[in-house]
Image (cartoon, rainbow, N blue to C red):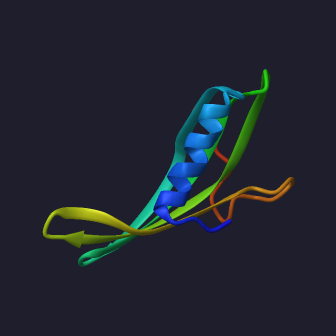
Amino acid sequence: EVFTLEGFIASRRARHAEGSISRYRVAELRHTTERFNGVAHRASVFVRNGVKDDEPFEVRGMIFFQCVDTAAGWRISAAAWTDRLPGQPLSSHPEPTEFG
C-alpha cells in the first residue's frame, strides 16, 4: 500500500474508531544509521504487537527512513516499511528479540 501522510493518518484513525484494537505497541529492536553531511538513512527492525478482536498478534519487519538536515533540524523526507513474510529473514540484520 502507498499512502500520503493524510491517508496514513486517516487509515489509523478509522482502525481506532472501529474499536477492534484494544492494545497496540510498536518498538524498534535494532537499527543502523548512516549519515553523510546533511543526509541520513536509517534502517530499523521493528516489532508491532497488540490485541485485535480479542486475539493477540505480533508482526516484525523493517522500516527505512530517509532524513535531511534543515534549518529547523532533522526532518524525515521519506519512509517505507514492510512486514516480514513467514520464514523470511530480516535483511542482513540478525534476528533480535525484544530483549536485545
Locate the N terminus by quadrant: bottom right
Relative placement, left or right, of 18 versus 87 is left
Relative placement, left or right, of 90 versus 24 is right
Relative placement, left or right, of 55 versus 83 is right
Q: Residue furthest right?
A: 87
Q: Is residue 8 visible?
A: yes
Relative placement, left or right, of 93 versus 36 is right
Residue at 49% in and 55% down: 31
Position of 56 relative to 65 (above/below): above
Residue at 15% in and 63% down: 72
Q: Position of residue 7 (x, y in %)?
A: 54, 59
Instruction: Please tell me how many numbered marks the rendered image carries.
Output: 0
Q: Residue furthest left?
A: 71
Q: 71 and 20: which one is in front?
A: 20
Q: Quadrant of residue 2?
A: bottom right
Q: Quadrant of residue 89?
A: bottom right
Residue at 72% in and 29% down: 20
Q: 61 and 3: which one is in front?
A: 3
Q: Is residue 98 visible?
A: no
Q: Position of residue 26 (x, y in %)?
A: 56, 39
Locate the C terminus by quadrant: top right
Q: Position of residue 87 (x, y in %)?
A: 86, 54
Position of 69 relative to 8 (above/below): below
Q: Position of residue 85 (x, y in %)?
A: 81, 57
Residue at 47% in and 61% down: 5
